[in-house]
Image (spheres, helix red, strand yellow):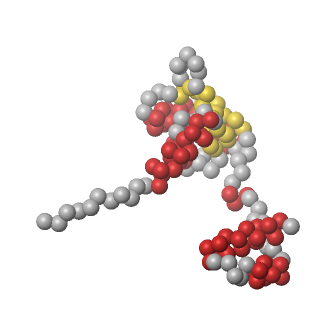
Amino acid sequence: MVKQRKSSARPIASLIGKTIDPVIRKRGLAKAELLAWWPEIVGADYADATMPDRIRWPKDGSAAVLFVRCDPAFALPLEYEREAVRQRLNGFLGFPAIGEVRILQHPLRKAKDVEKPPEPDPQKLDDLARRLGDCEEPLNASLLALGRQILARS
């Protein structure tokens, strides 16, 4: 009879969630999973135009207030679906934690909006590569990447 080994591999989300949770908790968000599941909570129409900003938990233990950042162009349509978002969020959390959703109109910066840094001068980059030639390979690649970033900014 062949014994099967139990795999020690775990999903990376289970490892990252525990690391990120303290940082997220400072902003008032209960779990990092809320950020990961946000597109499914609000739907495809609002996934790129909204994001949860913070949750304000009252001291009396009543339902919390969720503040949602929303691109101004999507604020009015989201206003009409605010109650549905609240219900889906409470369903995600498993209990009626959120009593109100407030919309904060704020433009969201997307990854495609971020400018790429300019390319460094090829002559300076070749000079840097020549100087780093005698380093071991992992260190050489790291230093070259760092040098490329520095040269691109100067």
Residue 81 horizontal side relative to residue 115, left or right: left
Residue 48 horizontal side relative to residue 109, left or right: left
Query: Which quarter of the figure is the N terminus placed in?
Result: bottom left
Residue 16 can be seen in this image: yes
Residue 39 location (% of width, % of height): 54, 47
12 in relation to 92, above or below: below
Residue 122 location (% of width, % of height): 81, 80
Residue 43 can be seen in this image: no
Q: Residue furthest left?
A: 1
Residue at point 63% right, 77% down? Answer: 136
Residue 142 horizontal side relative to residue 60, left or right: right
Residue 108 horizontal side relative to residue 18, left or right: right
Q: Nearer the viewer, residue 25 or 145?
A: 145
**Which quadrant of the view contains residue 117?**
bottom right
**Which quadrant of the view contains residue 42?**
top right
Q: Nearer the viewer, residue 42 or 6?
A: 6
Residue at point 81% right, 74% down? Answer: 120
Residue at point 73% right, 41% down? Answer: 106
Residue 118 location (% of width, % of height): 80, 69
Q: Nearer the viewer, residue 78 or 17?
A: 17
**Which quadrant of the view contains residue 132?**
bottom right
Residue at point 50% right, 36% down? Answer: 89
38 in relation to 56, above or below: below
77 in relation to 96, above or below: below
Q: Nearer the viewer, residue 53 or 15?
A: 15
